[in-house]
Image: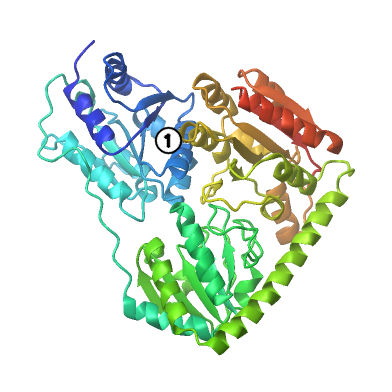
Amino acid sequence: MEEYGNIKALIEVMNANGVEHVFFNPGIDNVPVLETIAQYNAEGKKSPRSILCLDEFVAMTAAHGNYMASGRPQVVSVHSELGVLQIGGALHNAQWGKVPVVFFTENQGPLQRTNWRGEAFDQNAMVRSFVKWDYQLGDNDNLVDTLNKAFSIAMTEPCGPVYLNLPREVFWDKGENTASSSPKAEIEEAPEADASELEKAAEILINAETPLIVTGYSGRNLHSVDLLVKLAESLSARVVTTDVRVNFPNTHPMAAYPSTHVGYGNPLLTTADVILAIDYDMHYASPPTVPRSDAKIIHIDIDTAKKGIPLWGKKPDILVKADSSQAIPALTDIIDRKLAPQRRRQLQERFDVYKAEHNKLESEWQALAKSHADKKPISAHWLSHCIDEAIDDDTIIVNQTISPAAIVAHQIHRSKPGTLLSCAGGCIGWAPGAALGVKLASPDKTVISLMGDGAFIYGCPEASLWSASFYNAPYLAIIFDNQGYGAIKGLFREKYDVDNMGADIPTPPDYAKIALANNAYGRMVDDPADVLPALKEGLKQVKSGRPAVLDVRLAPV
């Protein structure tokens, strides 16, 4: 085999930074990368595992899912500008998901190319708005030094994707690489929380009558889930969490109505007198629910800038820039120290009221699902209820449902850290590839991917299922098949009082046959009595090592 000095250096940098997989779609530029990895494997040397993805979109979504499950930085290799374009919306999702992925391509010539303005063609410009940093390697740059900088930027909180544009000669160079830095990137440490600001925050929260905690991604630190539970219990404060992660158990009495990326926020925001926002992003598309004009806002986050736009467009009363996993217990300790006995009794009374409301709501949702046990067509309530019954506490749910998102959030119970992962961005099709990446990161866990029929098709199912089968990374894909673009139809009705506008799919594809064509188990389910048996059979197939797809036909929206 050929000896590629730069590529050997690249592998050593990846090893030093804990990279376990290189997700790729082949091009002439990454041949040396793949050849060198194969050489390392043959010689028994440590090297990331190369994962062939039949579509670049799947390469990026698999890296996204792998990061969410493993917490490790990711690497994606695709070919030149066309691979970058094909990644498309998956990069948007990675940006909003704060995924530390270093992806690189060859620089596509010739140098005299221009755009329609007559300006020099800029390959990096295609992705500049969707990355933390991009760089085109120059003649005087050292690859290892540049890679270290890329990993440092990607992995420093708030994490995010970075893009490297490399000349072809870098890949094919057979000389030794001489680096001026060590192969491990230096990660910038998060600042410690300002104790005086936490003291002020504690006073405000203790005296609040209707405090509300909102969080989006604090659960990326798995131990933060229990920390947030202690804080909520100390304050008797409800918690609204997005479905991006298990930030707070939805089984807990202080868990408020689940908030999803669909719709216009949560009504509790309009009644809270104090909002404690921890690791929370405004959704990039949906208009936010506006808090009370007199509501005090306390914001704890590493990413306090939020792209220059304060949460809800309102300057917070208290801003604490810190790692939430450190700030939450510090704030809880201050609150416990400051709480007087009488106030503790008052907060316990509030806790009991919220608990009763939570239990009542839970009973109503369960009763609603069970009332649909014989309803035809199958309802999303019944399907979600059956999923909840079929899984265990360790099952990882990879969720990109849209129209039934609120139903899924109520009916499927997740309390264990790391057992719910979802997409913070808006590009549909994340779920199939993300499930592949999650399973590669968690080979001993059962992985179930929930999606609509649109997400299944957009997610390049042939590519994700083939890789899942080839690399022994089976997952169960459950399609909430409402036979149309349900979310879009809902917007039609809401905004324009139009019922359809061609958003139905009256004769949907046979998604089960797509599964069968890619070495996976496939089954279409249209009878509510078959839902639970089909789920059990699908899980049995997955546990035997075979990917599986259940196409569950729901009532058209």
> Mark 1, residues whose alpha carbon is within 10 Å: few (<14), some, or many (≥20)?
some
Q: Quadrant of the N terminus?
A: top left
In the image: residue 81, left or right of residue 209: left
User: Total number of numbered labels?
Assistant: 1
Q: Residue at x 30, y 21 (%)?
A: 37
How has the structure been colored for display?
Answer: rainbow
- Residue 550 is situated, as x and y percent measured from the top left of the image, at 71, 31
Q: Residue farthest to the top?
A: 1
- Residue 381 is situated, as x and y percent measured from the top left of the image, at 78, 49
Q: Camera-side residue: 223 or 257?
A: 223
Is residue 317 visible to the viewer in this orientation of the structure?
Answer: no
In the rendered view, tell whether residue 215 sits above or below residue 407: below
Q: Which residue is mark 1?
A: 85
Is residue 301 visible to the viewer in this orientation of the structure?
Answer: yes
Q: Camera-side residue: 383 or 24?
A: 383
- Residue 194 is situated, as x and y percent measured from the top left of the image, at 31, 74
Q: Residue at x 45, y 55 (%)?
A: 223
Q: Residue farthest to the front?
A: 341
In the image: residue 429, left or right of residue 51: right
Q: Residue at x 40, y 63 (%)?
A: 324
In the rendered view, tell whether residue 407 sits above or below residue 455: below
Query: SS for tag 1?
Result: helix
- Residue 84 is situated, as x and y percent measured from the top left of the image, at 39, 35
Question: Which quarter of the figure has residue 106?
Answer: top left
Q: Residue at x 38, y 74 (%)?
A: 319
Q: Amino acid at mark 1?
A: Leu
In the rendered view, tell whether residue 40 sits above or below residue 394: above
Question: Which quarter of the figure has residue 259?
Answer: bottom right
